[in-house]
Amino acid sequence: MMMDKKKKHTDSEEDQPTAQPVELTEIEQLKEDLAKAEANSKEYLEAWQRERADFINFRRRNEQEKSEAGQYGAGEMIRKFLTGIDDLERALAHKKEGDVWADGIELVYRKFLMLLESEGVTRIEAEGKPFDPTYHEAILQEPSEQHESGVVIAVLQQGYKHKERVLRPALVKVAQ
């Protein structure tokens, strides 16, 4: 009988070491699965955050493009009117004293300028200013003792800008 007890005791000892590794491998497997799930979760969260940021940027760009399209469309329409303004300026440059018709043209000219100004269109100041290729287009260069080199000495065609965007650069003569 003693042997039986001893035998039973040995059997239970043999069972225990095999039971523990089974439990440990199962726990290790669960830990591994949890780590994989956490990694996937983190990856999905980061991807979702990137997509959300991309969508917000897309929406912002889309709104900005719509706004700019409206402004540029207005700028294109205004640019077409500038040739008419140029014609009025040339007509007024040849005005003689007592020309009644010239008074009417001058009135129309001033109304056009006021209308353009109300839409945010301004003239580009050029004469006497340093040449700036952003706002000026040099057509002629002329030696001048009265002006420093690189200074605009005459405006041949007036330039305009709509808010901060150049509609048409001023055509200028620059001192050499």
Image (cartoon, rainbow, N blue to C red):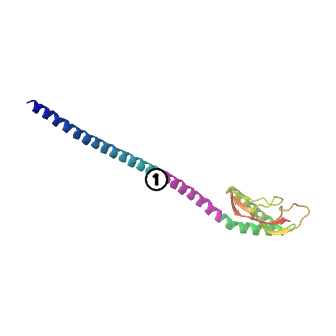
| Residue range highlighted in magenta | 52-76
- Circle 1 sits on which residue? 51
Q: Quadrant of the C terminus?
A: bottom right
On whether residue 63 falls in the magenta region, the answer is yes
Give x and y (percent) for residue 43: 42, 50
Q: Residue furthest right?
A: 145
Query: For the point 64% across and 65% down, which residue is it?
Result: 76
Q: Secondary structure at mark 1?
A: helix
Query: For the point 69% across and 66% down, which residue is it?
Result: 81
Camera-side residue of 111 and 144 = 144
Q: Residue furthest left?
A: 1
Q: Quadrant of the N terminus?
A: top left
On whether residue 161 falls in the magenta region, the answer is no
Indicate left or right for 115 with 10 as reference: right
Can residue 21 be seen here? The reply is yes
Query: For the point 67% across and 64% down, which residue is it?
Result: 78
Can residue 95 be seen here? The reply is no
Give x and y (percent) for residue 115: 70, 59
Secondary structure mainly formed by the magenta segment: helix
- 91 lies above or below 15: below
Q: Residue furthest front?
A: 3
Camera-side residue of 10 and 40 = 10
Indicate left or right for 64 with 47 as reference: right
